[in-house]
Structures are given as C-alpha cells and as structure tokens.
Image (cartoon, helix red, strand yellow):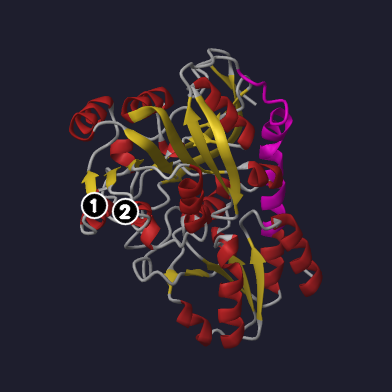
C-alpha cells in the first residue's frame, strides 16, 4: 500500500495517510448516459486510511462544481427512509426543541415532520436547486446555497441561534469538517444539540463490500471514528442508534460542550480491518465473476436489479459488465438510459416476462427493500434465483448459497 503526504480531514495529522484501495478511474455514479456510446469523464477512485484517528477518506475529491453539475434530482423522493420517524421521536423525547436548523434539508421531508410536532422556528439549507424548490413548495424557509460562515451569520442575524442543528446524510459529503463545525457552533445555542445521521461503513468494511464507497462521500465513519470527531469539535453524545438503512446508518444526538478537546482515541479496532479491505474486495469480485461466467455457460440470464450509486460502484469496481446481460430499475427516470462506466442498458422490470431462460437476479437494493423485490418477481417469474450484492446482507454467504443451489 502507498502512503500519501497530506493532512487528514478529521484530525489534521501531517503523518502519512495509507492508501487502502485504488479502484482505478471511474465515472460519476449518478450521471446516466442517454446513449451507449456517449463520452463520459472518469476520475481516480482512491481511498486512504488515517492511522491516527481512523478516518477513511478520499484525499483528492472531485471538484464539487463538477460533481454536482446538473444535479437535477432529489434522492429522498426516491429512497424510502424507514428510520426517519424514530429519529424524530428521539429528538422530541430527548430535546423537544423550539427551533431547528437543518443543514442539507433536501426536499424538506425531515423539517416537515418536525413541523407536525409543533416546532415553529424551522430553517433549512439546501444547495441542490431542484430539492430546495421542493422544500420551498412545502412553505419552508430554505436557503439555496452551500453552508458557509457568511450564510450562518446572515441566518443568525435574522433568526437568532437555534436549539438544534440537524445534518442527516450530509457530513460524509463535507470537504472541510473544521469549517462545518465552526458553522454549527455559530448557529447553535451555547447549550444546544446537534443531530447527525451518517452511513456506518463497519459491516461493509468487514465484508469487503466496495459498494460502501462513493465519489460523493469523501469521509467514511464508524462509531469509534465519530466519537473522535465529536470529541475534537466539542460535542458529547446523548443518544447513539444504529439503523438498517442503506447499508447501515448511525444517528448521534449530541450536546454542545464549552470546551473543545484535542485528544484522540487510537483506532486499534480499525487498522488491520482497513488495510485488509482491498484483498477482501478483490477476492469477492473474483468469486462473483467465476459464478456469473459459469451461470452463462449453463444458459442463465444474469440480470442486475437496481442501478443506484452502490450498484454502479460494484459493477464498475469488480468489472462485471461482461457478465451481466442488462439492468432493470423501477425508477422511470432511469429507464432506457445506460449505466455510467459499464454502459449496461437499463430497462423496466416488465422485460422479465419476455425472458424464457432461467435468471440469476443480482439484487443491488438496500436490505430493507430486498424482500419486497423478491416477492414481486417470484409472483411473475418462477425460474429466478436471487443473490444480494450489498451489505449488510452477508454477500459472501449469498454467493456460497447460490453456488450450492445451482451447482455452479
């Protein structure tokens, strides 16, 4: 593994960051192609591990101006969030704030739920013009720009400070964590609370699941890494919950402290696991290729169900494009386009009715949706076998079961 002279995004350590996996050049995962032969730009997909604080990170991220160019869609309207009500209940039971600022408000779904709890002072920040328009249509106060200190000062000049700041599925996108927390402390009451919802990579890391990696996520967290982060910027956890959402999620309700601590817990639990991640990914990818190659020889159609960002990472990183016949997705906005990188055609799930040969369906949906998809297809098509590609489902066990069932 290579080392890199750089400053860690979390602890600012000038010590070497260790490269743990290099998946080559890859396209932007949300940028679907209109035609199979369209030209697409690709970028290095490389990840480093900080031996001091445990943060896995992209050291040279794509310029946000390029990454979010023409970002004219809203993920929260596509992806159900089964844990969202419990998060609201946690906030109400522990804090019951009178004022809330949400950073990364998306289409306003979370703020709208808080409004139903009789919280009147609600403000959101959402740079995605498409999503912020949806939020404004719900009669919410939304600032359509990136979070920054100038914006925070304008907000506090108008509204004062807030009892609670919320950032759900936003922290992992933040390039400058120090500025982010300075912004939070600017808008937050002296004894206020910060609520963070972030992807939990621990299970995927142990399984060798490369779908936990995404070019939009520049930082990767586990519970211990989050504790280091919160300690560094002066927040103490009040409640910590794990959710089975999109590969795993951690929700931290924290309270602001007057002092900022600089001591770090050494990530003994992560060091060997992070450095062994590459080998696990490559070994899994090799086994998956072998099974899909054998299934083709036995007359199966290999079909990918789900073409979200996690699916794109798996297909491109494990070089599966030649082992998959086509992809299907129920989002009409994606149908009749082509997946970035692999250029697999995306069709409606209705096409399954026309397939006469037996099918292996590669499930690239979050675990909470897997059973729904299986029931839907089993009713329509009897000769179908499923294998899940995404953690927290045990992806290696899924391969073993498929191999045994079909004698591959």
Count neighbours of disc 1 (C-alpha within 10 A) and say few if under 14, some if 14 to 19, many if 20 or more. Answer: many
The answer to whether residue 361 is magenta is no
Element type where label 1 sits in the image:
loop
User: Would residue 315 be visible to someone looking at this image?
Assistant: yes
* Residue at mark 1: 140
In depth, the one of 325 and 9 nearer the eye is 9
Quarter of the figure with the N terminus: top right
Percent x, y for residue 158? 18, 33
* Residue at mark 2: 108
* Label 2 with label 1: CB-CB less than 8 Å: yes
Q: Residue drawn at (71%, 40%), measured in percent from left and top?
A: 279
In primary-sequence order, the first of circles 2 and 1 is 2
Judge left or right: residue 342 versus residue 20. left
Q: Residue drawn at (67%, 64%), measured in percent from left and top?
A: 293
- Vertical placement of residue 102 versus 161, above or below: below
Percent x, y for residue 8? 51, 21
Q: What is the CA distance from the residue labelled 2 to the residue labelled 1?
A: 7 Å
Percent x, y for residue 266? 67, 21
In depth, the one of 139 and 173 nearer the eye is 139
Q: Taken as a whole, is the magenta stretch helix, strand or loop?
A: helix
What residue span does the magenta drawing correspond to? 264-289
Q: Residue drawn at (37%, 61%), measured in percent from left and top?
A: 77
Count neighbours of disc 2 (C-alpha within 10 A) and say few if under 14, some if 14 to 19, many if 20 or more. Answer: many
Quarter of the figure with the C terminus: bottom right
The answer to whether residue 274 is magenta is yes
Percent x, y for residue 347? 43, 73
| Disc number for residue 380 | none
């Amino acid at each position: 593994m290579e080392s890199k002279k750089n400053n860690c995004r979390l602890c600012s350590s000038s010590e070497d960051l260790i490269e743990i996996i290099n998946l080559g050049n890859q396209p932007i995962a949300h940028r679907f192609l209109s035609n199979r032969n369209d030209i697409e730009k690709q970028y290095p997909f490389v990840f480093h591990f900080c031996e001091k604080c445990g943060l896995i990170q992209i050291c040279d991220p794509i310029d946000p101006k390029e990454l979010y160019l023409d970002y004219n869609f809203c993920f929260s309207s596509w992806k159900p969030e089964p844990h969202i009500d419990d998060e609201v209940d946690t906030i109400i039971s522990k804090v019951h704030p009178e004022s809330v600022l949400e950073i990364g408000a998306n289409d306003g779904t979370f703020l709208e739920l808080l409004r139903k709890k009789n919280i009147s002072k609600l403000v959101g920040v959402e740079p995605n013009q498409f999503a912020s328009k949806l939020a404004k249509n719900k009669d919410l106060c939304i600032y359509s720009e990136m979070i920054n200190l100038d914006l925070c000062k304008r907000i506090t000049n108008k509204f004062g400070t807030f009892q609670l700041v919320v950032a759900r599925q936003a922290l992992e996108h933040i390039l400058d964590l120090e500025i982010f927390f300075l912004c939070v402390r600017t808008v937050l009451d002296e004894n206020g609370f910060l609520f963070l919802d972030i992807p939990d990579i621990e299970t995927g890391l142990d399984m060798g699941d490369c779908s936990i990696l995404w070019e939009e996520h520049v930082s990767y967290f586990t519970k211990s890494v989050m504790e280091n982060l919160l300690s560094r910027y002066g927040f103490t956890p009040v409640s910590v919950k794990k959710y089975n959402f999109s590969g795993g999620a951690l929700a931290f309700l924290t309270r602001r402290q007057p002092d900022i601590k600089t001591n770090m817990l050494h990530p003994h639990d992560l060091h060997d696991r992070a450095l062994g991640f590459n080998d696990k990914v490559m070994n899994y990818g090799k086994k998956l290729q072998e099974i899909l190659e054998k299934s083709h020889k036995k007359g199966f159609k290999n079909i990918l169900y789900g073409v979200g960002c996690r699916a794109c990472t798996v297909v491109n990183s494990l070089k599966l494009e030649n082992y998959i016949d086509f992809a299907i997705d129920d989002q009409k906005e994606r149908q009749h386009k082509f997946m970035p990188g692999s250029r697999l055609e995306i069709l409606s799930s209705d096409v399954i009715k026309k397939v006469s040969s037996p099918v292996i369906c590669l499930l690239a949906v979050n675990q909470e949706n897997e059973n729904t998809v299986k029931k839907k297809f089993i009713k329509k098509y009897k000769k179908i076998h499923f294998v899940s590609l995404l953690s927290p489902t045990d992806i290696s066990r899924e391969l073993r079961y498929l191999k045994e069932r079909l004698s591959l």
